[in-house]
Image: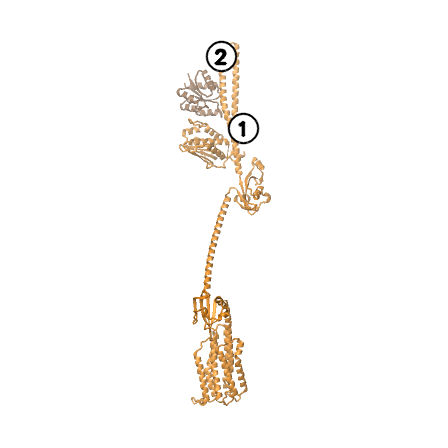
Chain colours: A brown, B orange
Amino acid sequence: MATILIIDDDEQFNLMMKTALEVKGYEVETASNGREAKALYQNKKYDVIVTDIIMPDVDGYEVILDLRRMGMSDRTIAVSAGGRTAADDYLLTAKHFDVAVTFNKPIDIQQFREKVDEIIKNHQ
Amino acid sequence: MQEILYSNSPITTALSAWALLLTFFLPYILGKKTGIRQFPKAIYQLMLICIYWNTLSLVGSLFFSGPDFGTSAKIIFGLQAVAWIQTGNAIYHIAEHALHFKRLNFWRLLNAVGTLNVAVVTLIFCLKESLFTEFTIFGYMPFHDHPYFKIYAILFFVYVLPELILTIYKLLSKTLQTGDKDAAQINLYMAGTFIFFTTLAFIFDFLIPISCDFNINGRHPLFLQWNQYATIFLAILCGQYFTSISFKNKSSHWLMKSLFNQLSDCIFTFQSDGKISSSNPSAQLLFRKSDSEMKMHHIRDFIPNLKFENEILMENMKVQINDELHSFCVSLFKYRTTLTTYMWLLLLSDQTNSLFYQQRIKTLNRQFADYKKDLIRYQDRLDNSEKKFKEQSNFSSTLINALPFQFWSKNEQGVYTTQNIMDIKSRGNLVQTTDSSESITDREKQARNSGVSNICTTYENDHHEKISEDEANNLIFNNKTVYIYNEQFIPIIAEKKPYKIIGLKQDITEQKRLERERDLLSEQKRIHSRLEDLGTMLGGFAHDYKNSIGAQIGFCELAQETLRSVPTDDIPEKKAKTIARAAELIDEANKAANKAKDSVNQLLSAIRNEASIAPKPMVFSPFLIIEDVVKKVQLTLPSNIHISTENIDKDLKIKCLPAALDRILSNLANNAIFAMKDTGGTLTFKLERTELEKKLVLPFSETIEPGVYAKFTIADTGTGIDSGTLERIFSPFFTTKAPGEGLGLGLTSALRLLKDSNAHFTVHTTLGEGTQFNLYWDLATEKTEDA
């Protein structure tokens, strides 16, 4: 059973993504920011890590860069609702940091699941 | 033929009587003619001889005339012959006196011998006449005939003639030698008449008797007779001669006297015994005696120790006069007053006086020297003042010419007295002219008449015509040229009104323009900042909103998915309808959520791209922004960091959003300060015009095309950036925070703004030395500004 880590400070969106993936039978863990997430992904290997970018304390870029250093860029999905500028800007930056895929909020759940499946398949 | 000694002719008797008469009148005639009372001794002698001679002649003619003459006639004749001898001697004597010859004893001897000889001859004639008549020599008797004539003729030739000839000779030679015209004339006349009378007497007495062989109408001619007549005339002549000469001397004497009277030196004349005969006024004044009182004194009364034996010249003779000790320079001369008398002349030059004058001259000289010194001092002072004045005026003219505004001054009458170069360039040379009364402003009048300093702002259009502030604002609004000046009228307060005034006219057009630009920029930044705040707020809002909407949409889809997964076969139709209805409702909710998502996206894009609200890029002077940034940064600047803004080109203009440039510079500055926070250092801003001739290709940055740019430099002397971080910086829109440091998105947004503004940048960094960012901005041209 594949394990997925979802990092998002918005509880409901976090829950929504968790639900959408749990329905598909994945084991899903959540964190509300980069700091919590780091505690998790340093001790456990996840098949897919989904992270928001703008978060308090430690943001998504740090997570992405951290994961890149761990060689897990291809298991990382960046999700952003944007901020003062368009979400595309953040996601473009994320792409430059070699994340596997990015999603604009609100996300297309089908596509999201497909991408997760695809990453898991690619690593089997 | 019998000789006769005295003629018995009445004519001769009458002539003799007449001649005798004449001799008595002789002194009178001479005195009358010459006005001289005293003659030399020789002239009186000659007169006496004439009287004596003619008396004897008359006596002889009256009592002893006729061919038979006895011893008495012979004696009288002999006595007459003595007179004859004496005449020659006397005449020569006069000549000697007049011509200043020394009298020789030879002539006295000759005179005596002659007289003695005549006496002997006469005695012989009386006692033994035959001694002559019978005198035989070589068988010939020379004195047999006319023994008296011959013997006395010999005596004449021996004793008289030489003296007469010598007199003539002396007169002539003197005449030829003298340079004095008057004396020459007198001498010549004298010599001529002397020769005439002598020759006449000689002819009558000797030549005629000899030539007629001693027979004139059967009678023996007289001899010796004519000579006595001639002697009278010679006597007159001698008197005249003497008086002529003495008259000449008299005029000299008068001249001398006048001179003496004028002299400041004392002059005394005194006789040989020392009795004063005359004194000049100076002498009278000195000794306080009148002329007549003087004459009663002896010269030794005044000068006790004077010895008058020789002519002397003596310096520094001390003489006490009325308790005053005088020192004289004494000159004593001897001078002749007549042929025989002389007098002394004493000349006293008062050295006391001359000493006094010398003293006076010394004092005057000293005073003169003092005055001269004073004069030199005054001249020096004058020179100094002049020099100072020149320096001062040079200083002030340099100063007023160096003033960065127009300067002029007017005197009390309103005439221009000074203008600096700037004023002359602007208005032409107005020195010595006045402004027309209507062109003088009230403010200037106020300064001149009331002494109130005034300052005001004036406006001129592009033709330098004065315009009002409203017109100026209108022209500025229409982008027309307007010159703005600060005009100041400063009175130079003095005792009296009206005053001199100084005018200053400062061109503040550029200053005002910069002020306007600054105002505009800050307005722009204010708008931009408000929009940014709004954008930030909306961004935050949109983020949260999208999260919520995203969750909602997601849940909606999950709900429908769930509903779709309900098996429809074993559900009653009514229930199935209800489930379908729920699915429809969820779908509606999903649609509404999606609509809300679109609205937020539209709003966001509106804020980001809405041209009408967002500030437009504008052309401005970027140094104003640098100044702002420096001001802002300095508020929180650590004390160990200095800011240097050395090379700021204030003429450069670029086109962009002022707020963007502000943000970029602020961020770079903050980063630089952050880099130096531990070490301290200098943050340097530069702004220069730069021309790239080649493409600028650098690592980490985009290629910069050749061209002209405004180049901004922001350099620090901080830690520098390591290559890893540098790489990240140049990854497009990379941003990171060093652990625990608040770098945030600043640099990213700065670089994005740079890109938006179509500007370029390079970075140079050396670890431990510092980092330098260069920004290349396209220069705004006039064309760009117009567009």
Number of residue marks = 2
Residue placed furthest toward the front: B323
From the image, which quarter does the C terminus of chain B lie in?
top right
Give left or right: position of B450 versus B266. Answer: right
For disc 1, the neighbor class at 10 Å (few under 14, some 14 to 19, many from 20) is few
Residue B618: give x, y in percent of width and height. Answer: 52, 32
Tag 1 subunit = B
Residue B554: give x, y in percent of width and height. Answer: 49, 18
Type of amino acid under label 1? Ile
Which residue, given by chain and number where applicable, does mark 1 sit on? B613
Quadrant of residue A32 within the rendered picture: top left
Type of amino acid under label 2? Val
Mark 1 to mark 2: distance in Å? Answer: 52 Å
Where B599 falls versus B248 (above or below)?
A: above
Which residue, given by chain and number where applicable, does mark 2 sit on? B566
Residue at the image point whose x is 47% and y is 25% from the top: A89
Residue B778: give x, y in percent of width and height. Answer: 49, 34
Front in this rendered view, residue B337 or B561: B337
Tag 2 subunit = B
Residue at the image point whose x is 51% and y is 18% from the top: B590
Indicate the secondary structure of the residue bearing disc 1.
loop
Mark positioned earlier in the residue sequence (1 or 2): 2
